[in-house]
């Protein structure tokens, strides 16, 4: 999916019941919906006109007419989209070539969609907060912990004092020691990971800036955060293992790293060169 329908799918879990009825109707009947006015949509979906307007605003449109235009553009687009097959449909009979194609296609589409979902103003604010922080603590467990470790390594290469530990209790301890000049970056796809929420709450008590990297649509972590960088609702919260969600979080890491590298190139270039030379496995 892409565009309007993709956006509706992303926000669906966080919508109020009246808005969800409209969203589900649009997703199930996009061709019919583009020819209907707001009152007709509301009646067909068993909801209200005000719910249509709220849904449009929730999705970032100026009104329902704008949402309808975006939907029409997508429905009548001549661009052919690749056939989507959920990963859950892979069976013992699925060939290795088919699995390779499915995983690569799903991953590339998921990453591409994040281009349109990331708030660039929030991204700039997060970079500014990180650059000016005296101390950075990074939180995450499980698959998000792998992303957190990658982020810590990148920030350290840029000369920033960033701390990450796999011990979730120590993450909480680190958050307790933060101050108003410090930043916590918390990774959790679900936004409901108990230990990460504890870290975020302690960081808030300490007066630190809290940055959340989590799924779109709102959750406990995003409500605690000063800034939220959202990745797409790419997979179920109850899953065999994190795949697409991990790529989305890693994309955020790479974006922050690249922005800092570009904007502060003269400051970090010498450090990067020195650290490269120091750890290079060459004789000399």
Image (cartoon, grey):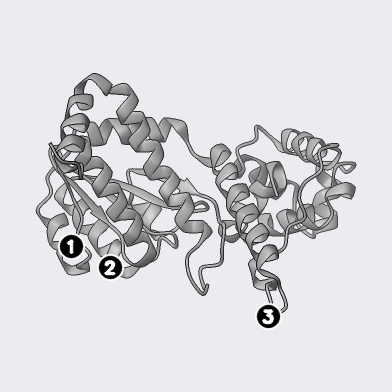
Q: Position of residue 165 (x, y in %)?
A: 19, 60
Q: Where is residue 175 in the image (x, y as percent from the top left)?
A: 16, 55
Question: Which one is closest to the eye, mark 1 or mark 3?
Answer: 3
Q: Position of residue 2 (x, y in %)?
A: 69, 45
Q: Residue at x 22, y 35 (%)?
A: 158
User: Of all residues shown, which one is farthest toward the left?
Assistant: 177
The residue pinned by badge 3 equals: 92
Residue in the foreground of this view, choosing between 30 and 159: 159
User: Quadrant of residue 36 in the image?
Assistant: top right
Q: Distance between the residues labelled 1 and 3?
A: 43 Å
Q: How far apart are marks 3 and 2 (CA)?
A: 37 Å
Whichever of labels 2 and 1 marks the residue nearer the N terminus, that label is 1
Mark 2: few/some/many CA within 10 Å (<14, 14-19, 20+): some
Q: What element carries label 1?
A: helix
Q: In this view, does 145 lie to the left or right of 284?
A: right
The residue pinned by badge 2 equals: 195
Q: Which residue is drawn at 69% across and 35% down?
A: 63
138 above or below 156?
below
Q: Residue at x 36, y 37 (%)?
A: 256
Q: Residue at x 57, y 38 (%)?
A: 116
The residue pinned by badge 1 equals: 172
Q: Distance between the residues labelled 2 and 1?
A: 8 Å
User: Of all residues shown, which one is farthest toward the front?
Assistant: 283
């Amino acid at each position: 999916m892409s565009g309007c329908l993709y956006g509706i799918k992303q926000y669906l879990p966080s919508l109020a019941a009246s808005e969800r009825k409209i969203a589900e109707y649009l997703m199930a009947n996009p061709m019919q919906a583009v020819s209907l006015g707001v009152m007709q949509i509301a009646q067909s979906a068993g909801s209200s006109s005000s719910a249509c307007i709220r849904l449009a605003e929730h999705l970032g449109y100026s009104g329902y007419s704008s949402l309808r235009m975006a939907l029409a553009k997508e429905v009548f687009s001549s661009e052919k989209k690749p056939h989507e097959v959920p990963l859950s449909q892979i069976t013992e009979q699925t060939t290795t070539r088919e699995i390779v194609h499915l995983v690569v296609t799903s991953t590339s589409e998921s990453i591409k969609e994040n281009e349109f979902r990331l708030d660039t103003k929030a991204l700039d604010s997060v970079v500014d907060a990180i650059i000016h922080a005296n101390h950075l603590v990074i939180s995450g467990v499980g698959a998000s912990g792998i992303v957190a470790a990658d982020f810590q390594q990148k920030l350290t290469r840029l000369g920033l004092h960033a701390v990450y530990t796999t011990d979730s209790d120590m993450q909480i301890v680190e958050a307790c020691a933060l101050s108003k000049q410090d930043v916590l970056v918390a990774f959790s796809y679900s936004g409901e990971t108990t230990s990460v929420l504890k870290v975020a709450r302690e960081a808030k008590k300490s007066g630190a800036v809290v940055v959340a990297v989590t799924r779109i649509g709102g959750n406990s972590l995003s409500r605690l955060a000063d800034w939220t960088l959202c990745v797409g609702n790419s997979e179920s919260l109850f899953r065999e293992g994190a795949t697409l969600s991990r790529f989305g979080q890693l994309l955020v890491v790479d974006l922050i790293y690249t922005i800092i590298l570009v904007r502060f190139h003269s400051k970090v270039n010498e450090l990067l060169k020195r650290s490269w030379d120091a750890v290079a496995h060459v004789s000399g």
